[in-house]
């Protein structure tokens, strides 16, 4: 266990180097968000007073996008998938096969430490931005909701990680995984509710997307926060999310086991 | 005239090199086109979902906005086709000292670093963007006059010039900061506001900055408004053309100044 604590601390030190980069990234990332929010405001301004879109008031919509941004800071994979693919291509994983260290656990530690640093840096511009929009920002109704939201974000992070990990393992079979990563990301952008809240999409599309793990990366935790899922629906949702975590883990292990058989240790 | 012919033949040679390079990774070539088309489709999905809940956003109807998203993508893809990879490579040339070699060649260095590689897939993507615009025009039951089409072409060129000059200006900072990756990523975020209708933004610091500072709210809005005859006043055209000229001028000044203070990275 101690060795993974070491990995965590190395991960923290390595990512701290990029803190200015992170700050810029988080601050620049707010520009498109502001654009989107202005467009939503214009739409709501065209509605009669107290107009709603789906179940969202203007405040609900603004809060939705702010929370998406927040969940994204907490869970998005930054460089992890590229690094894993590069490790495989350059033969760097050979050393992990020889040492008593588990590559998945090692990677998970690096991911967690990277997210911890990124979030703490991104918190500055994001909190400032939220403060500007405080009139429209909704707080969770009670502590229980907030707790379940955090639990759900944690599981979202795990699904996100297993997904990125598995995708990066394609490097065992193909030369360049970057296009696969980008195609997957484009799909995720829609299906996870990043682009739009899923419940204002056409019903057939939303129903279809909810069969995939993607809504549990972003839409579900945010809906928990906003109190849009409650009662039995909430518990079923959390159970499904936990099932996706388990499935993601199993898939990651399985693909690794298959890939390692194919691995030829180029470069040594 | 002779210089122009020489530069054109140089550009033709760069084209040939790029074709050879791209065709050695055919599958990758196709997949990148797919990636770009997916993002374009996502933008269109976003707008069409918005318009399933409203008829008009700040005075823009659905197919007008599709036109705007198409135009923004058209300009962005042209930018990628001509410049993007070259500009992101510049900081690498500086870091590795490869720029020294380019400075010695008997051509204009800015021409060389700006246009060396051609991104072929982006031509296909910009054609797709034009096709979407044409479809939107058909849905609007609209045929542009020759004058409107010409105005659109000139304004789109001005928009392209703005993107190119600003990105070039930002990348020139890598003479000092060495790594310009963050800058490139940051600029990409700006494309996102270029495809939104300008009238959705209330008067204020945000709108002023992205009109007179970094004129993102002009680059694709003005061409589309010229095309559709939606201009508030003809001054908007003058403004975009002026901003394009200003951006180009400033980027040239900073580039020359940076070169004069360039001390080479290695050797």
Image (cartoon, rainbow, N blue to C red):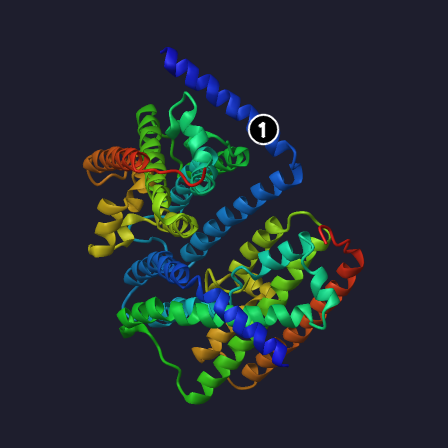
Horizontal and vertical percent for residue B31?
61, 43
Q: Is residue B235 left or right of residue A169?
A: left
* Residue at figure coordinates x 50%, y 83% from the top left: A148
Which quadrant of the rendered structure holds the C terminus of chain A? bottom right
Front residue of A200/B178: it is B178
Horizontal and vertical percent for residue B119?
52, 34
Front residue of A161/A90: it is A90
Quadrant in the rendering for residue A211: bottom right
Front residue of B20/A225: it is B20
Above or below residue A162? Residue B97 is above
Q: Is residue A84 left or right of residue A259?
A: left
Which quadrant of the rendered structure holds the N terminus of chain A? bottom right
Q: Secondary structure at mark 1?
A: helix
* Residue at figure coordinates x 53%, y 81% from the top left: A151
Q: Residue furthest front?
A: B267
Q: Is residue B47 left or right of residue B240?
A: right
Above or below residue A175? Residue A11 is below
Quadrant in the rendering for residue B5: top left
- Disc 1 marks which residue? B19
* Residue at figure coordinates x 34%, y 61% from the top left: A37
Horizontal and vertical percent for residue A25?
40, 59
Q: Chain of mark 1?
A: B
Whether residue B133 is visible to the viewer of this picture, yes or no, is: no
């Amino acid at each position: 266990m101690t060795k993974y604590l070491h990995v965590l601390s190395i991960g923290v030190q390595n990512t701290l180097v990029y803190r200015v980069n992170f700050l810029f990234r988080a601050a620049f990332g707010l520009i498109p968000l502001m654009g989107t929010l202005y467009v939503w405001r214009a739409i709501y301004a065209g509605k009669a007073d107290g107009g709603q879109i789906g179940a969202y008031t203007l405040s609900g919509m603004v809060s939705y996008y702010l929370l998406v941004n927040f969940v994204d800071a907490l869970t998005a994979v930054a460089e992890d998938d590229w690094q894993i693919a590069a490790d495989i291509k350059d033969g760097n994983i050979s050393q992990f096969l020889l040492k008593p260290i588990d590559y998945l656990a090692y990677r998970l530690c690096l991911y967690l430490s990277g997210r911890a640093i990124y979030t703490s840096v991104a918190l500055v511009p994001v909190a400032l931005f939220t403060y500007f929009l405080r009139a429209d920002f909704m707080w969770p109704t009670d502590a229980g909701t907030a707790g379940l939201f955090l639990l759900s974000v944690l599981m979202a992070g795990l699904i996100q990680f297993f997904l990125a990990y598995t995708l990066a393992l394609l490097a065992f079979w193909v030369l360049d995984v970057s296009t696969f990563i980008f195609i997957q990301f484009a799909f995720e952008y829609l299906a996870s509710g990043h682009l739009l809240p899923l419940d204002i999409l056409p019903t057939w599309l939303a129903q279809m997307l909810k069969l995939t793990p993607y809504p549990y990366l972003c839409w579900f935790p945010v809906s928990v926060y906003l109190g849009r899922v409650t009662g039995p629906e909430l518990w079923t949702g959390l159970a499904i999310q936990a099932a996706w975590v388990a499935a993601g883990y199993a898939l990651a292990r399985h693909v690794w086991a298959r890939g390692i058989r194919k691995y030829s240790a180029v470069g040594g | 005239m002779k210089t122009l012919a020489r530069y054109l033949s140089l550009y033709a040679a760069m084209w040939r090199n790029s074709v050879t390079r791209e065709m050695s990774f055919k599958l990758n070539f196709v997949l990148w086109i797919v990636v770009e088309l997916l993002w374009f489709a996502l933008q269109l999905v976003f707008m069409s979902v918005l318009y399933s809940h409203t008829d008009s956003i700040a005075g823009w109807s659905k197919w007008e906005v599709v036109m705007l998203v198409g135009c923004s993508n058209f300009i962005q893809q042209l930018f990628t086709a001509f410049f993007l990879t070259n500009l992101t490579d510049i900081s690498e040339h500086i870091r590795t000292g490869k720029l020294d070699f380019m400075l010695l060649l008997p051509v204009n260095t800015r021409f060389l670093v700006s246009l060396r590689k051609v991104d072929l897939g982006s031509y296909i993507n910009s054609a797709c963007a034009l096709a979407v615009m044409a479809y939107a025009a058909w849905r609007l039951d609209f045929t542009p006059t020759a004058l409107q089409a010409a105005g659109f072409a000139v304004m789109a060129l001005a928009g392209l010039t703005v993107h190119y000059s600003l990105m070039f200006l930002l990348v020139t900072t890598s003479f000092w900061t060495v790594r310009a990756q963050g800058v490139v990523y940051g600029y990409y975020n700006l494309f996102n506001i270029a495809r939104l209708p300008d009238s959705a933004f209330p008067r204020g610091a945000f709108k002023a900055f992205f009109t007179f500072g970094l004129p993102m709210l002009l680059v694709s809005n003005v061409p589309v408004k010229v095309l559709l005859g939606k201009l508030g006043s003809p001054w908007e055209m003058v403004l975009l053309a002026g901003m394009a000229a200003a951006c180009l001028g400033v980027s040239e000044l900073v580039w020359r100044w940076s070169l004069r203070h360039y001390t080479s990275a290695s050797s």
